[in-house]
């Protein structure tokens, strides 16, 4: 069978790995968003330093450089002093050179200029701006040099220049999706009196919108919007548009923007109306979608544009004026889980279109209509087309009442019965996702092969669906090769002709592989019970795909550790492997290592050993390193309740024998290194006199991350740490779900209750509240209405029993 278009011409894996080691990252200096900010800052502030920054992109000494220096009143001596810093080979080298320069400037003789000593006694603004604009090229630059420059040396800049530096840093962090330092940056920004508040506040929001959609990013945007309201700083129309982009916006943020627009009396433009309709329809908010479709009709009528049909065309006596419109396509999407209504609305549009255009449409493009085409901000439509059909198909794919055969039949109708509805890559992706949702993997594989046989180019979403289909259908090795083929094309930025059998790969003008694609691959591996591969992907994530993990990646990793522990406990060999572990040599090539793991359709007999340790211990260390490394104040958080008896492995009667077995099988130096790893990282990130470094700057945990960690604590025999984990959540102001709190209480009860008879005896004699009751009281104070009820606890008991069942984790 044709599982993968690239599988017949696989490249040498060693040569691919060689190219991985020689990879270059996309330079942030080419970021259009960052350069646009610099240009706008030059126009708004009239500061000549921005012209100098543009001239310093390349090392040269000509009339332009001399003119830019003179306009900034910078002496040539200062330029020579900082020239090697500005033109350092990388940002980390430059930041190290800054400290040396600041130590030398005090020894320099004055040249008679009053400004010489002033400019050389601190980090010059033009140096900081130049480094941020031109030298942040890699994730290492962003993790180390960028944070040192932003937090350690920004204080030496003039207060009027700090907002611009923080905005440049935000652009750089958004390019690599490093969200963790942003809360500190926003706090620094809001603590300053800003000279150009309208420009700088809107510019910061525009920079923040470059991050991938997440709760943390949306909350930061909301805090900035609240500060703008308090300071009466207006939100520009283009900022509304930037915040409502697909990549960034959340429904919560959209509602805040909607309210702010009404409060400030802002008249929405066509782009804003379409954006609101797109967002509310995407989330299935049909009432809001109706409201904005009506608003679009009014806008079109007022501006002499062809209006769309209203949302009530299916009702008797409704206003049937209008024509087929892109807004109608968006509105269909709001009927996400009601395919009957979606197709009924689509059918009505077909009827209205046929009444207005009696001549049948038989080919693509459609025959001219006697009505003028609908000209609107999102394009031109003259009839119901494949995009309308595909949007309705989304509802069928999401509707649980739609059977697999019905979904496939609806899709086949677009392929066979009319040329007007010729499927696009989006149509295929919708059907593939619907089949994955129903567990119809063989059928999904057949549709995937149809897509490969066509001449349609794959986009990122289709690639993601293909990776999921191949993995769930039992061909994870082909999914891995698919990822690497696209990553290879992305890395080399070559034309498709350089790749074998490459008709589905478009020119590498954008990034196909991001952390979302990798997360879906890892989640699929989790469902086919391959935690061993997930561990290797985590270890080589940046090396293989030039991406950093986010909170969902960590959540999947924690679930993989739980699954691995459970799988090993189910076999005698796995149980002995936990006792007698021997170091395993690492392959020089992660691609070879993962490929070798995926050659077998079944997982190995032992999957719970990772980095020569128990996988649960490694995952726990990663989580704790993230917690203590990213938030040093959490080291002082105390648990709200204590255990009565421990389930920790160290507390078991046979623990000394286990330790003896491990000491025989694992060299002392290796064991000592493992035990000290977390403490060394934490100590290094918070050493006195050193700027804080974030071990995982791209991870901001959410409720689901903590939920997965709590389950890991249970399976690794560390339920005694659950109360401390909940205290971390509260300190980080993470809103807990009832499900997380319920499972935490069920697991906590196993180590905090003194037994039913003793608890009842203690309660009757007022012997004090139990540790379980103490935690319940603490949760009630924290969670309020989200405190679990008795029904929630019963559901959690069933969930814990299901987790411990032998079928847990199976696909």
Image (spheres, grey):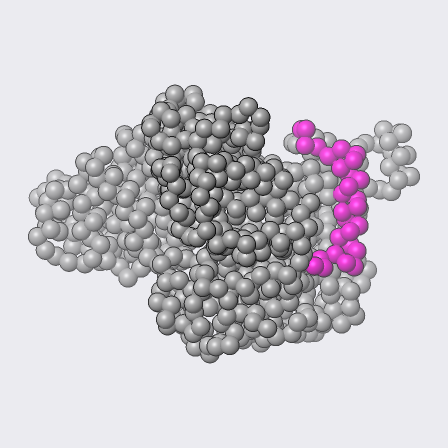
Q: Residue 721: horizontal and vertical position, in percent?
A: 69, 47
Q: Residue at x 42, y 64 (%)?
A: 505
Question: Where does the C terminus fall, quadrant-wise?
Answer: bottom right
For the magenta stretch, what is the residue range? 784-811
Classify the position of the N terminus by image quarter: bottom right
Residue drawn at x 79%, y 70% as measured from the top left: 572
For the image shown, how many numbered marks are present on the structure? 0
Indicate left or right for 689 with 395 as reference.
left
Q: Can the viewer see residue 276 in this picture?
A: no
Main SS, magenta residues? helix
Q: Residue at x 21, y 43 (%)?
A: 50
- Expressed as whole percent of the image width and height from the top left, the position of residue 16 reads 44, 74
Residue 220 image point, x, y percent:
46, 36
| Residue 622 lies within the magenta run | no
Please tell me whether residue 800 belongs to the stretch shown in magenta: yes
Q: Is residue 655 visible?
A: yes
User: Is 8 displayed left or right of 767 in the figure?
Assistant: left
Is 27 placed above or below 691 here? Answer: below
**In-image side of 63 versus 17 (left or right):** left
Q: Is residue 417 above or below residue 486?
A: above
Which residue: 68% across, 70% down?
Answer: 602
Q: Quadrant of residue 247?
A: top left
Image coordinates of residue 328 in percent, x first then y, are 48, 37
Along the line of sight, the residue nearer the viewer: 729 or 704: 704
């Amino acid at each position: 069978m044709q599982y993968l278009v690239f599988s017949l011409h696989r490249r040498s894996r060693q040569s691919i790995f060689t190219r991985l080691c020689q990879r270059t990252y996309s330079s942030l200096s080419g970021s259009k968003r960052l350069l646009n900010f610099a240009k706008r800052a030059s126009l708004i502030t009239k500061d000549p330093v921005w012209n100098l920054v543009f001239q310093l992109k390349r090392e040269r000494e000509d009339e332009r450089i001399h003119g830019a220096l003179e306009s900034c009143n910078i002496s040539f001596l200062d330029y020579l002093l900082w020239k090697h810093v500005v033109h350092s080979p990388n940002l980390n080298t430059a930041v190290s050179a800054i400290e040396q320069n600041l130590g030398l400037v005090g020894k320099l003789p004055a040249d008679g200029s009053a400004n010489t000593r002033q400019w050389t006694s601190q980090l010059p603004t033009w140096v900081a701006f130049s480094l941020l604009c031109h030298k942040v090229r890699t994730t290492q630059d962003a993790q180390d040099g960028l944070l040192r420059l932003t937090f350690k040396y920004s204080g030496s800049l003039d207060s009027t220049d700090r907002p611009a530096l923080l905005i440049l840093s935000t652009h750089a962090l958004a390019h690599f999706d490093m969200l963790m330092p942003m809360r500190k940056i926003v706090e620094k920004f809001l603590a300053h009196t800003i000279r150009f508040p309208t420009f700088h506040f809107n510019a910061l929001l525009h920079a923040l919108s470059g991050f991938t959609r997440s709760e943390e990013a949306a909350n930061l945007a909301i805090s900035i919007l609240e500060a703008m309201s308090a300071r009466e700083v207006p939100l520009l129309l283009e900022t509304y548009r930037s915040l409502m982009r697909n990549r960034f916006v959340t429904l919560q943020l959209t509602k805040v923007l909607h309210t702010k627009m009404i409060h400030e009396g802002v008249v929405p433009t066509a782009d804003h109306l379409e954006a609101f309709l797109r967002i509310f329809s995407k989330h299935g908010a049909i009432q809001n979608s109706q409201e904005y479709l009506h608003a679009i009709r009014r806008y079109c009528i007022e501006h002499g544009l062809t209006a769309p049909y209203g949302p009530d065309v299916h009702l008797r006596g409704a206003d049937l004026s209008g024509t087929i419109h892109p807004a109608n396509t968006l509105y269909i999407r709001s009927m996400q889980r009601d395919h009957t209504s979606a197709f009924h609305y689509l059918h009505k549009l077909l009827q209205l279109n046929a009444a207005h255009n009696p001549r049948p449409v038989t080919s693509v493009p459609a025959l001219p209509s006697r009505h003028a085409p609908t000209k609107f901000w999102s394009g031109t439509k003259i009839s119901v087309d494949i995009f309308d059909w595909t949007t309705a198909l989304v509802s069928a794919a999401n509707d649980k009442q739609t059977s697999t055969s019905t979904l496939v039949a609806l899709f086949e109708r677009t392929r066979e019965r009319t040329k007007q509805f010729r499927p696009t890559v989006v149509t295929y992706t919708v059907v593939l996702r619907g089949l994955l949702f129903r567990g119809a993997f063989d059928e999904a594989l057949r549709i995937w092969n149809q897509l490969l046989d066509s001449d349609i180019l794959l986009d990122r979403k289709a690639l993601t669906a293909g990776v999921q289909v191949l993995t769930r259908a039992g061909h994870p090795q082909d999914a891995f090769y698919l990822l690497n083929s696209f990553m290879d094309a992305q890395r080399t930025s070559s034309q498709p002709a350089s790749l074998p059998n490459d008709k589905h790969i478009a020119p590498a003008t954008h990034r196909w592989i991001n952390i979302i694609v990798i997360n879906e691959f890892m989640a699929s591996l989790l469902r086919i019970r391959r935690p061993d591969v997930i561990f290797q992907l985590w270890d080589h994530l940046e090396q293989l795909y030039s991406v950093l993990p986010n909170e969902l990646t960590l959540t999947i990793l924690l679930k993989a550790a739980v699954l691995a522990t459970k799988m090993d406990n189910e076999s005698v060999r796995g149980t002995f492997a936990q006792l007698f572990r021997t170091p395993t040599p690492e392959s020089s090539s992660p691609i070879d290592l993962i490929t070798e793991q995926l050659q077998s359709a079944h997982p190995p007999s032992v999957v719970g050993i990772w980095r020569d340790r128990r996988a649960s211990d490694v995952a726990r260390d990663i989580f704790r390193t993230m917690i203590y490394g990213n938030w040093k104040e959490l080291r002082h958080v105390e648990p709200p309740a204590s255990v009565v008896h421990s389930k920790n492995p160290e507390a078991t009667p046979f623990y000394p024998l286990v330790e003896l077995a491990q000491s025989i099988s694992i060299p002392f130096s290796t064991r000592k290194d493992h035990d000290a790893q977390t403490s060394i990282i934490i100590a290094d990130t918070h050493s006195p006199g050193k700027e804080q470094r974030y071990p995982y700057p791209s991870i901001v945990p959410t409720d689901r991350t903590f939920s997965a960690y709590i389950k890991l604590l249970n399976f690794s025999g560390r339920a005694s740490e659950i109360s401390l984990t909940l205290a971390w959540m509260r300190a980080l102001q993470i809103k807990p779900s009832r499900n997380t709190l319920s499972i935490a209480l069920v697991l906590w009860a196993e180590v905090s209750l003194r037994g039913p008879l003793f608890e009842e005896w203690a309660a009757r004699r007022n012997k004090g509240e139990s540790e379980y009751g103490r935690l319940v009281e603490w949760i009630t104070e924290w969670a309020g209405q989200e405190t679990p009820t008795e029904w929630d606890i019963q559901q959690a008991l069933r969930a814990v029993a299901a987790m411990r069942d032998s079928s847990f984790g199976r696909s």
